[in-house]
Image: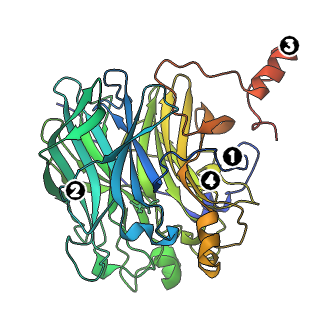
Amino acid sequence: MSERPSLDTTAWTREHAHGIERTDDNTAPIIYPPAEKTDPDNHIWDTWLLRTPGGEIAEVNGYRVIVALSAPNDLLPGKRHDVATHRFYYSTDGRQWTPGGRVFGDTDPLGSRQWAGSAIYDPSTGAVSLYYTAAGSRGEDELSYTQRLAVAHGGSLVVDEDDGVSFEGPWTHDTLARPDGEWYEREEQSRGMIYTFRDPWYFEDPETGEAYVLFEGNTPVPEGSEACDGDPVQQEFNGSVGIARAAHDEPTACELLPPLIDGVCVNQELERPHVVYRDGTYYLFIASHKHTFAPGLDGYDALYGFAADALFGEYEPLNGSGLVLTNPANAPFQAYSWLAYGHRDEILVTSFFNYYDYDRPSLDDVGLFPEPEQFRRFGGTLAPTVRLGVDGHETWIRGTLDHGHLPTRDEELPETIDERIGRLRGGHDRDRGGYGH
Ligand code: FRU
């Protein structure tokens, strides 16, 4: 019998968030457009790697696979969320990605469009489960913003020497969970500008073997509540990291549990939660935006993280405030939707190249540009991978790799500039201290 986990929700507090500040350890270098995009025909943004149930990056006959949200690249970038569909890309070297097409081929997944999720390949059976967000309802005339967690199962991954990699159905699409209204806000309860119930992330706890799905939600805060000292405006900022019990061999099993973390009075969107487990510590990461912080807090579009010695917490924000990795002040929206994963003794972080050559205070101003400028300034491709060092509850940037370079399992990464300087100086200076900008 596994021990019953503590189900207390950790609070990400305003006090923590007041400590958010750019430093060399958390600020990525400026990104320049790559010579080639990951997909020449489509914008791509939120991306995830095909993993095994135990959390390793899957390598199937030497191929690794990523799934990304996509939209045709002649669509105005700001409209892409309205038509998002999943495409996949495969690679033998983790650098060159071959477009594999739409994950579900010509068949229809749930929702009028599909948002972020996760993809699991079971090497013992070859079965694939694709967890995703079904946004809206298929066939709706007017786009709605209802969201539910969904899973496609029954399909598999096929590797053919001549034709490369493909996902093969038939798929069965099922709704995994809808918000319950008590732990997780329903759309009609939402008081804020954005409503979320999305981004299912399958995770097996390496210490107990139990399966879970993490997701992004909002904590209901009824009007008149005492939360945030009764401040009704702050109460609208109520993002959470949700969790549900799942099952290894039953892809549709899903029982909602109370959230792992919430940011009530702090932030409205704790996006794409995922966990990297290292040496007994659970590192829980989320992406969030500058504009979703509650009034009185100055955050950034950034990767934030928390650490605990058990999956159910209690979590502490990494580096005191939670801030792990952000964009430089002169390109504050150059990357978004970071995804961290373990690689040897470091953590690698991939993301997408968002708006560049753009330093206005808000992304809303993108819409003020003429359309050709909106296209020109949007990356829509994989960003350079960032290398993070980790020591307990502290992280720092060690350096970066190329756009879309997601090293294969055994790939040894080059010494960083700081490591080299430290070594030449006699080995005292460790690799801390940013990437030397
Ligand atoms: C983050 C995000 C996800 C969502 C997707 C929709 O980039 O907001 O939470 O699934 O974008 O495009």
- Quadrant of the image occupied by residue 378: bottom right
Q: Quadrant of the C terminus?
A: top right
Q: Which residue is mark 1?
A: 26
Q: Is mark 2 within 8 Å of ligand 1?
A: no
Sequence-wise, the earlier of marks 1 and 4 is 1
Asked if residue 365 lies left or right of residue 221, the reply is: right
Q: Could one spot residue 116 in this view of the protein?
A: no
Q: CA distance from mark 2 to mark 4?
A: 32 Å
Q: Is mark 1 within 8 Å of ligand 1?
A: no
SS at badge 1: loop
SS at badge 3: loop
Q: Amino acid at mark 2?
A: Ala
**Which residue is drawn at the image coordinates 58% and 38% (left, top)?**
393
SS at badge 2: strand
Crowd band around label 3 with a 10 angstrom C-alpha radius: few (<14), some (14–19), many (20+): few
Q: CA distance from mark 1 to mark 4?
A: 12 Å
**Marks 3 and 4: in contact by CB < 8 Å?**
no
Asked if residue 91 lies left or right of residue 292, the reply is: left
SS at badge 4: loop
Between disc 1 and disc 4, the foreground one is 1
Q: Residue furthest right?
A: 425
> Compared with residue 203, is residue 260 higher up or lower down, i.e. above or below?
below
- Quadrant of the image occupied by residue 126: top left
Q: Which residue is mark 3?
A: 426
Sequence-wise, the earlier of marks 4 and 3 is 4
Between disc 2 and disc 3, the foreground one is 2
Q: Which residue is mark 4?
A: 321
Sequence-wise, the earlier of marks 1 and 3 is 1
User: Which is more toward the observer, 160 or 267?
Assistant: 160
Asked if residue 334 lies left or right of residue 114, the reply is: right
Tell me residue 194's x, y (percent): 43, 75
